[in-house]
Image (cartoon, rainbow, N blue to C red):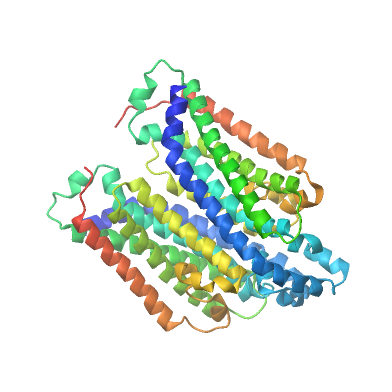
Amino acid sequence: MNIYLHELKSLRKSTIIWTCALIALALLYFSVYSGLAKDAADFKKLLSGYPAQLRAALGISLDNITSLLGFYSMVFSFITLGGAIQAMNLGVSILSREARERTTDFLLVKPVSRQAIVSAKLLAALTMLLATNVVYYAAALIFATMVKTADFSFQVFFMINLTLFFVQLMFLAIGLVVSVFFKQLKSVLPISLGVVFGFYIIGAIIATGNNDAERFVSPFKYFDINYIINNARYEPPYLFAGAAIVIAAIAATYAIYTKKDIHAIS
Amino acid sequence: MNVFLRELKANRKSLIIWSVCMFLLVASGMGKYTAYAASGANSKIFNELPASMKALLGIGSFDVTAMSGYFAMLFLYLEITAAIHAVLLGSHIIAKEERDKTIEFLIPKPVSRAAIITSKLFAALVNVVVMNAVTLAASIIMVAKYNKGADISGEITMFMLSMFILQLIFLSLGAALSALIRNSQASGSLAAGITFLSFAIAKITDLTDRVNFLNVLSPFKYFGYGDIVAGKSLDFGMAMLSLLLAALFFASTYFFYCRRDLNV
């Protein structure tokens, strides 16, 4: 319990900064929406002139692309990128910070098992991610209702925002498992930024095809917002794959951290 | 000289990893070109989309079925990779001494702080040039492999030149921030945050013309891709201003580091 509370306190400032950043980004995008809505009306007229097969080939769904949810789905990938960086930072730093801040000697001699330590830290990270998501969702809901031109489904909106949490979970788990492999991580940033941007770019460039197998490579592509808007549910294979990755990574973290040779302060 | 050689050696492994990643990025990006070119018949529709729609679809204002337009779309991702590399490099190369506790060894040596900074920044510059060269080579090779239209090596070189200026800006930004801020973790995060913000702004100004004044905050937008694709060379005034900005940041690195209270 002590470790959990201590980690919460030390993560507090960074979480607040990240939440404000995500909200500010959302605010920026929503404020652009009103200008876009006008363009959208013209574009809809243009698109309706093309035959249906052509539209289907381009993957453009007439209603979705101009609605608030359609717009949100496109800008949301960006917010997910920011959230992923936060989660990855959290995952990579939370276990390696003991080595970095020279507190290993103090913590590991306490009568607390290593599993308990990992659990407490994991729980603290989860709490912070949950807090970020809740506050962000509230803010996004307020913004969306402020700029909407037509009613949208709150349930679908909630489901879209939930994917942020899922992607963050995946990156948290990936970050945790990556961090246990290093003896001492001197700096969290190169790994976390590199991995997150790597997946983002892979998702943006490679997984643009309709090839399902390619979508498994990048966590950013696991949840196709258009599908959620159309069907109001997630795609089961990707949901399972995501859950499997999270569970496997966390299990690996426990396994490796418990058996790992942790060096004294150098 | 010693500091310069030592820094080159220390950064060698990281540079190799980043270069390989950049090469793979260019290769995979080009690999996807065939998918875009295949839908060439639809380019008329692409061109008639309103600008904001195109931006949302990630196409921007280019004809992505032509190689030059496609490369312009891919280029933003190459630039952000290079920018992250440069900003992390600049930030680390200054902050690592205090973080790794080697500052006590280095400072009493009969080398002035300014000389240390010069050697380190030169080593960082060499890294940035190598990164740029790798991207240039990879781009030319991969484009030649997939290109069915006109040769665009000239345009690619222009792109790389603009990327080099961008790398200089971010390198100097990272260095200046870590010379200024006491906590090395905080300065790295701040530098990365600013890079990410510039990227976000670049994407947002694509969406709508109304916020074009924000472009000044985003180095990614200093050089218009449309102009480069059209074959024009870089805007001289903009290039000069960017170099001036980088020079300003470099100068502040020296200024702040020489007056800094070192964390021993």
In this orientation, which residue lies closer to the viewer: B158 or A59? A59
Can residue B186 be seen by looking at this rendering? Answer: yes
Residue A13 image position (x, y, % from top left): 43, 41
Give the total of numbered labels.
0
Q: Residue furthest top?
A: A111
* The C terminus of chain A - image quarter: top left
Q: Considering only vertical position in the picture, is B211 above or below A230?
A: below
State whether residue A253 is above or below residue A228: above
Residue drawn at 27 percent across, 57 percent down: B5
B19 to A48, vertically: above or below: above
- Estimate the x, y position of residue B168 in percent, counting from the top left: 38, 67
Q: What x and y, as percent, mark residue A128?
A: 52, 37
Answer with the quarter of the image where residue A236 lies. top right
- In the image, residue B43 lies at what x, y percent? 74, 75
Residue drawn at the location 44% of the way across and 58% of the way down: B194
- Can see residue A181? no
Please tell me which residue is depicted at 32% across the width and 65% down the height of the picture. B249
Residue B122 location, quadrant? bottom left
The front one of A85 and A250 is: A85
Side of A115 relative to A265 (left or right): right
Q: Quadrant of residue B29?
A: bottom right
A238 displayed left or right of A31: right
The residue positioned farthest toward the front in the image shown: A146
As drawn, B136 above or below B10: below
* Residue occupying the far left of the picture: B110
